[in-house]
Image (tube, rainbow, N blue to C red):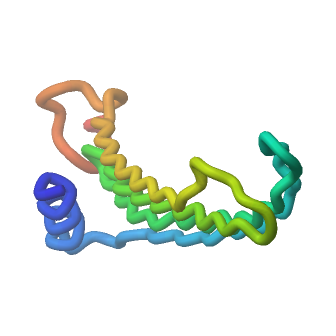
Amino acid sequence: MLAAAASLGLLLAAGETIQWNAGVETQALGRNEPTSDRRAGLGELDLNAHFGLSRRDADIAAALTYSPSVLLRQVVFGTLTGTGNATRHIGRLELQPDWRRPRGSPRGPCSTGA
């Protein structure tokens, strides 16, 4: 977690244009589950989010994403064992150097010397 916070700080401190995106997705589901003596009703609510920051300059492209997810379950009728809520957190840092520019060449547009 500390590495992700440090990476975010570096992205913000760079002073370049930073692009961001965010999204949320929800899904509700109700179903009948078989039990040993009869059936039980189960309701689920799945919440997913996505937050991302990205930056690209002449030397490197960087992207930091965070995707939390929560699954809430509730027994509506009957008895059902083994149900519970769940959470998931995914973080990803991508760094990609610009391999098209030869090592040691100057930054900026190329001049022909003419």
Task: Determine if residue 27 is in view.
Answer: no
**Quadrant in which the N terminus is drawn:** bottom left
**Quadrant in which the C terminus is drawn:** top left
Seen from the viewer's position, the closer of residues 35 and 60 is 35
Picture coordinates of residue 106 (x, y %)?
17, 40
Depicted 88 relative to depicted 14: above or below? above
Q: Is residue 37 left or right of residue 57?
A: right
Task: Determine if residue 5 is in view.
Answer: yes
Q: In this view, does 15 lie to the left or right of 90?
A: left
Depicted 14 relative to depicted 31: above or below? below
Give the residue at x 46% y 58%: 87
Picture coordinates of residue 22 (x, y %)?
54, 71
Residue situated furthest front in the rendering = 37
Q: Is residue 94 left or right of residue 59?
A: right
Seen from the viewer's position, the closer of residues 10 and 16 is 10
Residue 60 appears in which quarter of the rendering? top left
Give the residue at x 15% y 72%: 13
Give the residue at x 17% y 26%: 103
Give the residue at x 62% y 71%: 24
Q: In this view, does 108 lie to the left or right of 71?
A: left
Picture coordinates of residue 59 (x, y %)?
25, 44
Picture coordinates of residue 35 (x, y %)?
79, 44
Seen from the viewer's position, the closer of residues 26 and 63 is 26
Residue 66 appears in which quarter of the rendering? bottom left
